[in-house]
Image: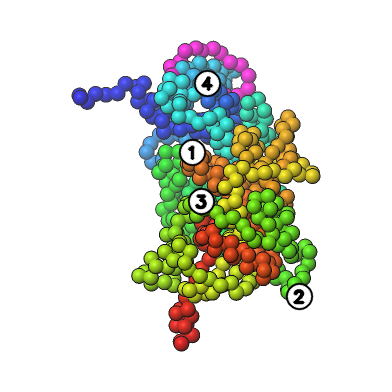
Amino acid sequence: MRIRELSSEVVRKIAAGEVVTGCFSVVKELVENSIDAGATAIEIEIKSGGKEYIMVKDNGRGMTKEEASVAIMPHTTSKIVSIDDLDTLLTFGFRGEALSTIASVSRMRLSTISDNEELGVVLDIAGGDITGEKPLSGSNGTAVEVFDLLYNTPARRKFLKSASIEGRMVTEMVQRFILAFDGIDFTYSRDSQVIYDTRGLESVEARAALIYPGLSEKDLIPVSESSAEIKIRGFVTLPNRTRKNRMGENIFVNGRYVRQFELNFALERGYGETLQKGNFPFAVLFIDIDPQEVDVNIHPQKLEVKFASTASVLDKVKRAVRSAIKGAGHFTINVVHSEDNTTGSSEERKDISEIYQDHGISDHGFKHSWRNQKVFDNSASDTYTQSRFDRHLFRSFTPAEKRESSQNKEKSGVAKASFIGVFGERYLIAESEDGLLLVDQHAAHERIIFEALKESKRISPQNLLMPLELNLERSKMDMVIAREETLKKLGFTFNFDNDKIIMVSIPQVMRTEGAIDTLEEILDEMRLEGLETPERVFDNLLASIACKAAIRTGDRLDIGQAEVLFEELKKKNLLVCPHGRPISMVIRLEDLDRYFSR
């Protein structure tokens, strides 16, 4: 095949692939252009997730007729004259470059009026070519309307996600702009419904409370740290205001949102030991740094950056957060002392039989006595491999040559263990052939509930005496509507009243307390569909419910109940909790003898 030069049409469509990765990326480019144009008010509207219609309108500096005609051509910009300008660039992008690539894969209408012109222009564009032109009167600014995205590249259009998923991704993109630019009024509409209107909300705190309805401005702790090289500012929450993923962590470098693990990890390290494993804070952090000290062009969508001195930046982020947390007050752990081992405060302690009744566990084959129960088929726990248990359980205690025999004994049920008692209201203690066996009572109970839920395939609902109105961030409200059937299988049912969603039932195994938090975790987990198999995602949903239904640290087990739980665990040969955390560990007798020099 002979080498030949590609046509300009093919080149533009290929180049558009780096910009148009989804509807959200089009919105991102257009909003960034509006910000660069000095807009103080930006209106965003999408329909069908953006696949059919996207509109971004601003009151910034408009363009003349001549500039508008040039702006839709490739490699045009008002930002750069020489290559040296790239090192000091503080704007978001090259307006003409984005318009050119978007115009080449859509039908687009560009309406703009320059500050010093009486009349503007409206250009109709299809596939990158101007098909119509007419004059425009009004106030200065620019509006870009995008119709039928990727209409002329059907092979790529079919890879766009569903309207609900594309719309959710646009919503999340808009949320970041709202947080990052509190001096700009944003209005965002989706399918003719206003989702966000920030007019009158002139602080990051107020906007964070708008986006995350569970937060209030009082939950946000200011972060402020500056030096000659870097300035870090923003807000974080206390360790008791967290979520189960990093979706609430928003980090901006020179005003640009970045998704970079090292920065998120540095933020979390600032909390030290006060942040429970698996919990992540809400945060809005701005890192302002000399543009010559950061490269923003290492990622096609500029979602990652490269610092000249990465270690220094990460250390400053960690110290800034730690300083803010320390300055917010003192954190204490309340230890409840009981004079009588068989009684306790009704609010602080709960007999396990009451806990089981609260959870409705008897409906899934469990009585609070735990006796005479069916033994589950061990094949149900194949997902949680023996090798993983071996890594957690024996790595520190058993020589390599003894591991295989220990594994086989446990797997075949030959290993014997005798129950001894309960320690610290959280661990069961037993004597095994290998040594002293410690069992996490919450993890064990959680796994047993999970196996029962997995076997039943569907969870019975329990109606709430007082239905709860949901007040979640918009993307999660959309997911409740889109995934109603799956949520119903999990025991959650809802009534829909105009734009309100009322939760009328929850899974029978769950407490009413914390039901909305559990629902939010489930909705977060549903975001992984497409990245993991549906079966795995559903198992993760069951695991979230089992975690909330299980007995908690501090829930009192008497000796009889603890022993029954232990025996049930032995029968089922369960090694790890549904989240992969080990249920038990062994301290070998030889190691104890060695420690005590016997």
Indicate left or right for 72 with 335 as reference.
Answer: left
- Label 1 vs label 4, nearer the camera: 1
In the rendered image, residue 138, in percent from the top left (x then y), is placed at 63, 19
How far is disc 1 from disc 4 in space, using C-alphas? 27 Å
Which badge, 2 or 1, comes first in the chain's sequence? Answer: 2
How far is disc 2 from disc 1 in space, using C-alphas? 53 Å
User: What residue is pinned by disc 2?
Assistant: 340
Which numbered dot is residue 147? 4
User: What residue is pinned by disc 1?
Assistant: 530
Q: Is the Cβ of the residue at disc 3 closer than 8 Å to that at disc 4?
A: no
How far is disc 3 from disc 1 in space, using C-alphas? 24 Å
In this view of the protein, can residue 257 be seen by the observer?
Answer: no
Is residue 87 positioned above or below 149 on the image?
Answer: below
Q: Is the Cβ of the residue at disc 3 closer than 8 Å to that at disc 2?
A: no
Which residue corresponds to the image point at 64% horizontal and 44% vertical from the top-left? 459
Indicate left or right for 355 with 225 as reference.
Answer: right
- Amino acid type shown at disc 1: Gly
Which numbered dot is residue 380? 3
- Amino acid type shown at disc 4: Phe
